[in-house]
Amino acid sequence: MNIILLGPPGAGKGTQAQRLVAERGMVQLSTGDMLRAARDAGTPVGLQVKAIMAAGELVSDAIVSALIGERLDSMDEGTGAIFDGFPRTVAQAEALELLLAERGRQLDHVIELEVDEAALIERVCGRYTCAKCGTGYHERFKQPQVAGVCDVCGSTEFKRRPDDNEETVRTRMEVYRGETAPILPFYEERGLVSRVDGMADMDQVAAAIEDVLSR
Ligand code: AP5
Ligand code: ZN
């Protein structure tokens, strides 16, 4: 099974993708994570995208489509893909169609996480991750069980994304409305879109996604 999780910044795409990885053995293909890894490693792609990401603008379609193609090539045929943060433009949606067809894969579901944008600012600006293992936390919604200590690996170091400030989050939301939301009709024409209430608590969102996947 191959699915897309679609929604504005903070909608919970990464959160739900991680659950599906743990529960269904699928692979998460997050272009945001791939670009951050390239940026942190200082690769040529990383150097090229650093300022664009910090401003909340979109990296070129060619760069992200190439990253997705490489990642698909490294996967076993039978393993399902969760596209998280990709595609983000109509051109990327068209590129994905080709990338999947070339590999004998097809798209099964596009799940749109519907959210209230005002609440997203708080979600995004309050989140942080363990610097060692990457587990995600939130100042209000998901604190470690022991304050200041990662539940998973015991590390006491945490980090925040440079683009998780209010001004940049607002830009990212505008970019979502202008560039990414227009891909919905593309997938609606193909009968692939299901909508899930992304404002429910995390377990309820996960259950609603399971419901879609079992159809
Ligand atoms: P990317 O990394 O994809 O960021 P994004 O789309 O802005 O999404 P986020 O990671 O911010 O949010 P999310 O929906 O995953 O939410 P999360 O689960 O963390 O992209 C970053 C940048 O890279 C882009 O701006 C662009 O520059 C570039 N880029 C990436 N892909 C690209 C592409 N394809 N083309 C061009 N450029 C690209 O949840 C957020 C917080 O809320 C967490 O703290 C979580 O714990 C909490 N939370 C989640 N669900 C719930 C819930 N139900 N209730 C309460 N809290 C919740
Ligand atoms: Zn950790």
Image (spheres, rainbow, N blue to C red):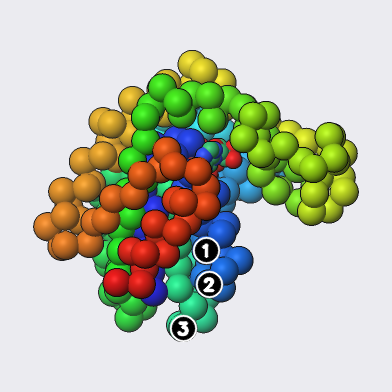
- Along the polypeptide, which appears first: circle 3 or circle 2? 2
Name of the residue lying farthest toward the left: 189
The quarter of the picture where residue 125 lies is: top right
**Tag 2: residue type?**
Arg
Helix or strand or loop: what does disc 1 sit on?
A: helix
Q: Secondary structure at mark 3?
A: loop
Q: Position of residue 145 (x, y in %)?
A: 79, 42
Q: Is mark 3 within 8 Å of ligand 1?
A: no
Q: How dense is the environment of label 3, judged by Cα within 10 Å: few (below 14), some, or many (20 and up)? A: few
Mark 1 vs 3, N-terminal side = 1
| Residue type, numbered disc 3 | Gly
Q: Which residue is mark 1?
A: 20
Question: What is the three-letter code of the residue carrying label 1?
Answer: Leu
Circle number at residue 24 = 2
Identify the residue at horizontal 45%, vertical 73% (top origin): 80
From the viewer's perspective, is 42 left or right of 196?
right
Q: Residue at x 72, y 37 (%)?
A: 143
Relative to 205, 181 lies left or right:
left
Task: Tell me where residue 174 appears, x and y as whole percent.
Answer: 33, 25
Decide: few, some or many residues near mark 2? Use Cα within 10 Å; few <14, some 14-19, many ≥20. Answer: few
Q: Nearer the viewer, mark 1 or mark 3?
A: 1
Residue, disc 3: 78
Distance from Cα at disc 1 to Cα at disc 3: 15 Å
Dots 2, 1 in contact, CB < 8 A: yes
